[in-house]
Amino acid sequence: MQIMMKIPFVSKRNTVAVVRMSGVISTSGRAVLNDQSFAPVLERAFRKGKPSAVALSINSPGGSPVQSSLIGARIRRLAQETEILVFAFVEDVAASGGYWLAATADEIYADTSSIVGSIGVISAGFGVHELLARYGVERRVYTAGTSKSQLDPFRPENPEDVARLKRLLDEIHENFKSHVTERRGEKLASDRDLFTGEIWTGRGAIDVGLIDGIGHLVPTLKDRFGDKVRFRVYGLKQGWGKRFGMSIIDHSLNSIEERAAFAQFGL
């Protein structure tokens, strides 16, 4: 007969899985944030050791709406399957796709100076057809299909292409609005249009219902789960090539891309 022994005065400590989500959201191989790379990270965070909660530490100016949606949907699926609460903590910025990720959480907290919002969609490009004409360069394009060559930067802008792009942007914007409305519900201010692409600091974001409060990750979760709560941190691991400096060009390009994305918010 096996006798089970219990050690007195010893209780199970709460554990919070912390997932660091920092950078531009993109399908690019140089990107830090995309669904393919973060799928195993999120799986471990939610399923390893039965955590009391999962905390997302977010610092992202946004990026791909599709990747934002895929990551967000994965977070919600895992939260529902494991019945685990999700908290989001905004560092410098959770804007555009970064806020999409934050909105997947059950509660959102930020610093007083964090940048939050930018619930909109943008598409940027350039036009150089006049420059080519000035130097006598002729652009030759052959297509099968009347809509195959759209918004070609080497040709004059076509109003039909612009109208088509605007329709696509509006549809994506509606998806973004639906996501935020579904997740934040009655917390959102009813007397403000929150979907213009406007941004707020942490204090202002509370007033319009985009976040739940001002708070930093460790003290907030210690208040919730006790001073002895343990934090288990998850994130992407660098490959040995990057660690030994074998991806210098790739890393430099990624840094330029990220700096440009963060710079639009003064960061």
Image (cartoon, grey):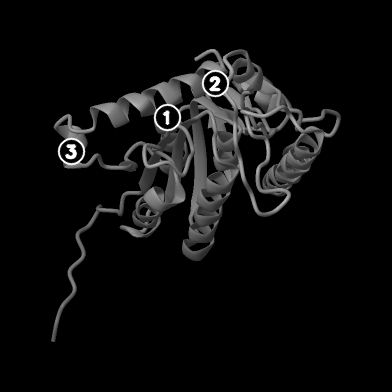
Amino acid type shown at disc 2:
Ser
Q: Is residue 267 left or right of residue 66?
A: left
In the rendered image, residue 100, in percent from the top left (x then y), is placed at 60, 40
Within-10-Å neighbours for mark 2: few <14, some 14–19, many 20+: many
Residue 267 vertical position relative to residue 83 in the rendered view, above or below: above
Amino acid type shown at disc 3:
Gly
In the rendered image, residue 266, in percent from the top left (x then y), is placed at 54, 13
Q: Residue 108: which quarter of the image?
A: top right
Q: Is residue 205 left or right of residue 15?
A: right
Q: List the single residue furthest toward the right.
A: 191
Q: Pointer 2: what residue?
A: 114
In the rendered image, residue 249, in percent from the top left (x then y), is placed at 28, 27
Q: Which mark is residue 241?
A: 3
Q: Is residue 201 left or right of residue 87?
A: right
Distance CA(mark 3)–CA(mark 1): 36 Å
Q: Residue at x 65, y 32 (%)?
A: 123
Q: Is residue 204 visible?
A: yes
Distance CA(mark 2)–CA(mark 1): 17 Å
Q: Pointer 1: what residue?
A: 219
In the rendered image, residue 239, in percent from the top left (x then y), is placed at 21, 42
Q: Residue at x 21, y 35 (%)?
A: 242
Q: Is residue 105 visible?
A: no
The residue closer to the viewer here, 24 or 149, is 149
Chain-order first, disc 2 or disc 3: 2
Image marks 3 and 1: residues in contact by CB distance under 8 Å: no
Distance CA(mark 2)–CA(mark 3): 34 Å
SS of the residue under disc 2: loop
